[in-house]
């Protein structure tokens, strides 16, 4: 991917916040989430389940999973326009038009009583205002691009007639229907076997290289991050705790949580050694700790950590960390 493309910011998220209301209380779920996405870049959002990765993506396209949840603050500038300030009609044009979404489980997001081709063509007609014949032609072409064999015939197939890997390719085709600037891929390979997973990852990187599309890749798998991502944002408790290039974050991360995630990877241990874990549990909604949200599980905790929330600060060029006592030595030394 051209360095020129990677220098151009397409999406700038600043202080994104989501709250949950109910029972007379308000709880902050996402807290001041900020990051930039470059054109043609693959940015990984990494963290344990419940860290806020999927919530961040849902907030950006304003499809939060509950009516108790709402965006309470922040801005998200897509090509210079704050999409969080748009009315519903304008946002519908962005959703599926400028931003495409690839969900973890395509079976839950593909209409089982509508053919695959019709679902793609319907999106093309809505966003591009073309006729049925042209929409079909474009849909067949997209199916071909994502590696669906015999796309003219498969256009008329239903989701249940596709394998798991083919359904995921179809989901990607739906997301690509209107030539989006950004794809959000929410754990798109979790339910697939290793061989199919590798095919889907290659497809996404090929789409980035051929179309110049930017991708927000949500995952808990650092192995996948090392394969496909350019930069990584590590999330914990609804906050970004570390952000930088994948080599710096995975190989020389500064936050104790990042160090814990890396140490938990099986490849980090010797044969026969038990897989390491981070003691304790991630915080739950309604029970977020004060100060640094990682402090109840942190090996470097001090009284300050339990009282003051650290801000993202520059640790090195292009590398930010939110920690009062960031790690200074290499992660390999920390893990031993």
Image (cartoon, rainbow, N blue to C red):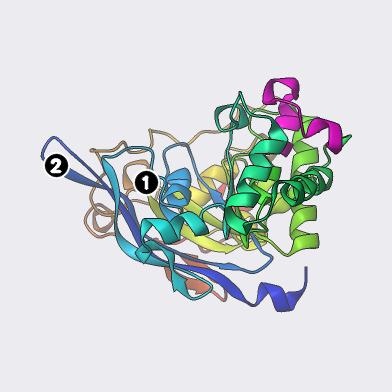
In this view of the protein, which residue sits in the foreground, 185 or 297? 185
Q: Can residue 223 be seen in this view?
A: no
Q: Where is residue 6 in the image (x, y as percent from the top left)?
A: 68, 72
Quadrant where the C terminus sits is: top right
Is the residue 1 above or below the residue 57 in the image?
A: below
Kindly state the secondary structure of the residue where label 1 is placed.
loop
Residue at left offset 81%, top offset 31%: 154
> Is 280 in front, or is 66?
66
Q: Where does label 2 land, which residue?
A: 25
Q: What secondary structure predominates along the stretch shown in magenta?
A: helix
Look at the image and tell me in which quarter the N terminus lies: bottom right
Which residue lies under the disc numbered 1? Answer: 237
Seen from this angle, which residue lies furthest right? 150
- Would you place residue 206 above or below residue 161 in this image? below
The total of numbered circles placed on residues is 2
The residue segment tinted magenta is 151-171
Instruction: In the rendered structure, find residue 99 and report the number of the disc placed on it.
Output: none
- Seen in the picture, residue 183 relative to 37 is either above or below; the reply is above
How far apart marks 1 and 2 lie (CA) works out to 18 Å
Where is residue 230 shown, x and y percent of the image?
A: 67, 61
Does the magenta segment cover residue 161?
A: yes
x then y, percent, for residue 109: 56, 33
Is 54 placed left or right of 213 in the picture?
A: left
């Amino acid at each position: 991917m051209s360095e020129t493309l990677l220098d151009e910011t397409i999406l700038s998220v600043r202080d994104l916040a989501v709250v949950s209301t109910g029972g007379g209380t308000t709880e902050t779920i996402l807290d001041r989430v900020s990051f930039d996405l470059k054109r043609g870049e693959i940015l990984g959002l990494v963290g344990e389940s419940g860290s806020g990765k999927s919530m961040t993506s849902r907030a950006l396209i304003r499809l939060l999973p509950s009516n108790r949840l709402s965006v309470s603050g922040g801005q998200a500038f897509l090509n210079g326009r704050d999409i969080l300030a748009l009315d519903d009609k304008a946002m519908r044009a962005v959703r599926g038009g400028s931003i495409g979404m690839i969900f973890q489980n395509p079976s839950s997001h593909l209409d089982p009583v509508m053919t695959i081709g019709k679902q793609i063509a319907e999106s093309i007609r809505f966003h591009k205002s073309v006729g049925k014949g042209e929409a079909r032609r474009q849909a067949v072409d997209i199916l071909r691009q994502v590696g669906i064999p015999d796309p003219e015939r498969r256009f008329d197939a239903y989701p249940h007639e596709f394998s798991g890997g083919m359904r995921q390719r179809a989901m990607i085709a739906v997301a690509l229907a209107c030539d989006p600037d950004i794809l959000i891929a929410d754990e798109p390979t979790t339910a697939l076997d290793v061989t199919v997973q590798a095919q889907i990852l290659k497809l996404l990187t090929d789409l980035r290289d051929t179309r110049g599309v930017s991708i927000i890749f949500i995952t808990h798998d650092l192995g996948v991050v090392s394969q496909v991502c350019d930069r990584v944002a590590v999330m914990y408790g609804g906050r970004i705790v570390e952000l930088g290039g994948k080599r710096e974050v995975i190989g020389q991360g500064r936050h104790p949580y990042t160090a814990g995630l890396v140490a938990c990877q099986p490849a980090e241990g010797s044969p026969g050694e038990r897989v390491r874990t981070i003691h304790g549990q991630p915080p739950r909604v309604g029970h977020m700790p004060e100060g640094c949200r990682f402090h109840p599980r942190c090996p470097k905790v001090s009284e300050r950590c339990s009282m003051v929330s650290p801000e993202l600060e520059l640790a090195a060029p292009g590398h930010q960390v939110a920690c009062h006592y960031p790690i200074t030595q290499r992660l390999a030394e920390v893990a031993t």
